[in-house]
């Protein structure tokens, strides 16, 4: 377990390190350096794809949006201002793009998922009865049941370790709304995990 | 009493209901910690300031040390749960980059000669460029096509494998190329309606998406390989000035640069062009030649008391080759076998031995004749 956390910190070190040299990289890209542009893509495409998939489940739409985003970046590179965090800027831009796409299309699936917040499917119960440890795969499937907005907040908070203020900035809400959103997401997650443990114990009781 | 090991609980005395309550209470406390963004950031990101703060906090609150561990585990698990299938994400990332590079090169080509041109001028220039390509295809006797296409002014995307393992290249039409170390692939970015073309240096394995309207052409130093949709290797033996095309599925047409000689290859056939002697040598696949190619996946088929016509049909669709046989003659033949590591010809050898039939390749089809079984 200790090794696990050390390993994760190391990975995080790698990704945080990327944020440090980024002013030169951005400036170089603005000047028309295609290699810098390509580096920016390589550094952040994974995070962008993961983020996009939280907001919008359709893989093709996410890929197209990222494609359009980078084409626009390259076309307007001279007009872009200096950015403090490239990742932050890219995430925010991608979010805006994906939401305007779904606003145009009014995809039904986007709305339907909102309703699934706190409910547990019957399959989960039987699975969990056999499994005491809350495995990562279980957490993942619990997360997939949450609304896109909640998944988005969880991603920004737990994967990119953004503060509530940063989350508020990306999602374009005020600090309090972001804090509330995080609270609701954590409550939903807690209820899912708690429910798992409760079921486990109810099962133990039946044995006595 | 209870002790905690990760998220499991060891029961030693308290009634289960009370345990249940205590555990739930603990979870609530864990989530209090998780709600603290400074705690989460401390767990996830190395930071000396946060380290100092939380080390001190733990020292002042030793009763919470288990709680801290639990919370940390939970945070790390939730962090891990954010990742999806990394192979899929990597593939999506490469594919998207291909599109980005292609789009940029194409628009670059359109605006390259003159900026701020009226649209119809750009269209005229594009048509002119396409016209040049068309002329080149017609004048193959006077001109070496690959040298003309290697013109550096036109828009190209070049992928070079500078690593030690195969590099996957995704092309916009859905085809996939595995470049061996040291190989490079140059693809034209003019979206051509009639052709898909690439220039290859070094060794590669191609999996070409089927598009009967647009043949896929690979230009190499000595040969010109043309396919509609198929998978095959192209290998170069530098010292000997030879190039080999080996077919896995589908059929491939290979000719020398000047298109004076053309051969059609079926699965498990290979063709070697020797530049010194200027000949095309066709043969069955020499496993040693392709041994090092990692894309070598076997086509494995299991048959349990299956009629031979069914087996032949399966082989035909698996390898993408038309197999012609007399259904009547072989209708009563049934075979139980598993065919895996053999080449197509070896598989046919086995079937023919079992049925007394024989086969021969002709043009681009396989003919199976004879055979009887009662």
Image (cartoon, rainbow, N blue to C red):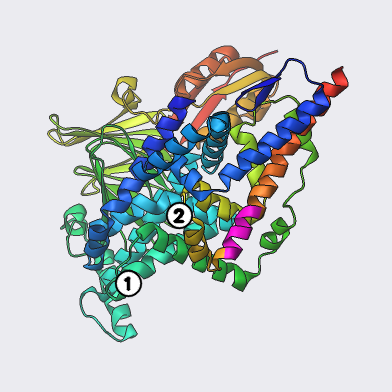
The residue at which mark 1 appears reads as: A75
B140 up-or-down from B12: above or below: below
- The residue positioned 43% from the left and 25% from the top of the image is A3
Residue A4 spot, x, y in % from top left: 46, 29
Q: Nearer the viewer, residue A193 or B365?
A: A193
| Quarter occupied by the N terminus of chain B | top right
A93 up-or-down from A162: above or below: below
Residue B298 spot, x, y in % from top left: 47, 25
Instruction: Inspect the magenta stretch and tell me whether residue A177 lies in it.
Output: yes
Residue A74 spot, x, y in % from top left: 32, 68
The residue carrying pointer 2 sits among few (fewer than 14), some (14 to 19) or many (20 or more) residues within 10 Å by Cα, namely many
The residue at which mark 2 appears reads as: A48
Disc nearest the viewer among 2 and 1: 2
**Picture quadrant where residue A192 is located:** top right
| Distance (Cα) linking label 2 and label 1 | 20 Å
| Quarter occupied by the C terminus of chain B | top right
Q: Chain of mark 1?
A: A
Number of numbered discs visible in the structure rendering: 2
B101 up-or-down from B238: above or below: below
Magenta segment boundaries in residue numbering: A176-183
Q: Is residue B41 visible?
A: yes
**Picture quadrant where residue B5 is located:** top right
């Amino acid at each position: 377990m200790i090794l696990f956390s050390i390993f994760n910190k190391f990975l995080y070190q790698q990704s945080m390190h990327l944020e440090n040299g980024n002013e030169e990289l951005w400036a170089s890209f603005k000047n028309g350096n295609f290699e810098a542009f390509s580096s920016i893509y390589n550094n952040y495409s994974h995070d962008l794809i993961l983020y996009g998939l939280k907001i919008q489940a359709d893989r093709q739409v996410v890929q197209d949006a990222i494609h359009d985003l980078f084409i626009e970046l390259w076309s307007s590179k001279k007009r872009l201002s200096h950015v403090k965090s490239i990742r932050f800027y890219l995430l925010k831009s991608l979010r805006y793009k994906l939401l305007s796409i779904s606003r145009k299309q009014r995809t039904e699936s986007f709305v339907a998922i909102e309703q699934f917040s706190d409910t547990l499917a019957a399959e989960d119960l039987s699975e969990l009865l056999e499994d005491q440890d809350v495995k990562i795969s279980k957490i993942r499937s619990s997360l997939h049941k949450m609304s896109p907005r909640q998944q988005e907040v969880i991603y920004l908070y737990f994967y990119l370790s953004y503060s509530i203020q940063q989350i508020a900035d990306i999602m374009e809400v005020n600090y309090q709304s972001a804090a509330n959103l995080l609270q609701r997401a954590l409550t939903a997650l807690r209820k899912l995990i708690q429910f798992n443990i409760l079921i486990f114990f109810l099962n133990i009781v039946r044995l006595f | 009493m209870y002790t905690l090991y990760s998220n499991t609980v060891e029961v030693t005395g308290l009634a289960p209901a009370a345990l249940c309550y205590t555990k739930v209470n603990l979870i609530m406390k864990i989530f209090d910690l998780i709600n603290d963004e400074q705690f989460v950031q401390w767990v996830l990101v190395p930071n000396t300031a946060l380290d100092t703060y939380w080390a001190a906090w733990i020292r002042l609150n030793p009763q919470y040390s288990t709680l801290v561990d639990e919370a940390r585990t939970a945070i790390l698990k939730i962090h891990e749960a954010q990742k999806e299938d990394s192979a899929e994400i990597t593939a999506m990332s490469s594919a998207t980059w291909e599109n980005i590079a292609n789009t940029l090169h194409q628009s670059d080509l359109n605006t390259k000669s003159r900026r701020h041109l009226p649209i119809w001028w750009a269209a005229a220039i594009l048509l002119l460029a396409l016209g040049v390509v068309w002329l080149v295809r017609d004048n193959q006797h006077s001109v070496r096509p690959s040298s003309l296409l290697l013109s550096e002014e036109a828009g190209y995307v070049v992928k070079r494998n500078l690593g030690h393992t195969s590099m996957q290249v995704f092309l916009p039409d859905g085809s996939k190329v595995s470049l061996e170390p040291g190989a490079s692939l140059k693809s034209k970015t003019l979206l051509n309606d009639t052709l898909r073309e690439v220039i290859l240096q070094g060794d590669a394995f191609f999996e070409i998406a089927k598009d009967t309207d647009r043949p896929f052409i690979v230009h190499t130093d000595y040969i010109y390989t043309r396919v509609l949709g198929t998978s095959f290797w192209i290998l170069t033996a530098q010292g000997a000035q030879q190039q080999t095309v080996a077919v896995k599925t589908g059929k491939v047409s290979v000719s020398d640069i000047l298109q004076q000689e053309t051969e059609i290859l079926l699965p498990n056939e290979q063709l070697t062009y020797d530049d010194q002697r200027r000949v095309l040598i066709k043969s069955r696949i020499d496993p040693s030649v392709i041994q090092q190619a990692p894309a070598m996946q076997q086509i494995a088929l299991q048959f349990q008391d299956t009629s031979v016509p069914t087996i032949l049909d399966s082989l035909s669709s698996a390898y993408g080759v038309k197999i012609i046989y007399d259904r009547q003659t072989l209708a009563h033949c049934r075979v139980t076998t598993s065919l895996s590591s053999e080449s197509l010809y070896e598989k046919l050898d086995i079937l023919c031995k079992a049925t007394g039939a024989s086969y021969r390749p002709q043009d681009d089809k396989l003919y199976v004749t004879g055979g009887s079984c009662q």
